[in-house]
Image: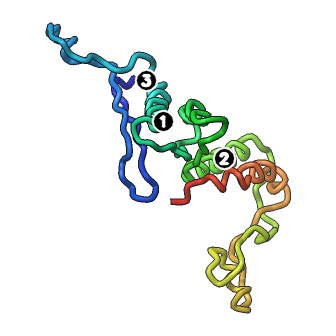
Amino acid sequence: MSLNGCVSVISIDTGKILDLEVMTQYCKMCEMNIKCDHECSNYKGSSGNMESVGAFRIFERSVIKRELQYTEYYGDGDSKAFLKVKDIYGEDTVTKLECIGHVQKRVGSRLRKLKKNQRTRWKSNRNLMHGQCPDGKDSWCRYKRALSDKRQYLEKSPGLPNSVMKVIKATYLELCDKNLLKNACMV
């Protein structure tokens, strides 16, 4: 359980912090029974909800205090805070950006789960797949780079068998969704 939390808004252009909300459920003065006029904790609730409350407070005061509206929210895949702010200036006025690391984590997790639940043998019959690889001499795909240089390429990877392709195809297509990847932060 966390007694303290911090949410910030950072400019993508400058990297500077535009706003910050520090929250606490703890007050040292109250714990020590010190009788004086002070501001006690500024948050009551579960520690898991701190991010949502902090984001809402920041977005809510952005127009009045900063004279601006935040248009994008960058958070991890399971963040509930986005749901609190996506309609704050009107319907769907804030877009969620997804960290590419979280997308990669999802791909790995889903494929490991599929492999665990399948009885299929994961042995190859050299089923080479380069249809989704980018073309050109600057491609990360060695096969496509060789094609652009008009060189023959000897594939060292065994490729995936058709039985495995059938199992992972739906997961692959879901996780390669253009909208998901368009909103993925590639940094």
Location of residue 44 by image quarter: top left
> Which of the pair 91/110 is nearer the observer?
91
User: SS for tag 1?
Assistant: helix
Q: Residues within 10 Å of mark 3 (few under 14, many from 20)?
A: some
**Image quadrant in which the N terminus is located:** top left
Identify the residue at horizontal 69%, vertical 42% (top origin).
Answer: 113
- The residues bearing labels 3 and 2 have C-alpha atoms spaced at a distance of 31 Å
Identity, as a three-letter code, of the amino acid under mark 2: Arg
Task: Select label 1 or label 3 by which is in front.
Answer: 1
Decide which of tag 1 and tag 2 comes sooner along the chain.
Answer: 1
In the image, residue 164 sits, relative to residue 26, either above or below, namely below
Residue identified by numbered label 1:
59
Q: Residues within 10 Å of mark 1 (few under 14, many from 20)?
A: many
Are the residues at dot 1 and dot 2 in contact (C-beta closer than 8 Å)? no
Q: Which residue is mark 2?
A: 112
> Where is residue 123 drawn, in percent x and y?
77, 60
* Residue that appears at 75% across and 67% down: 132
* Residue at image coords 34%, 23%: 3
State the SS at label 3: helix
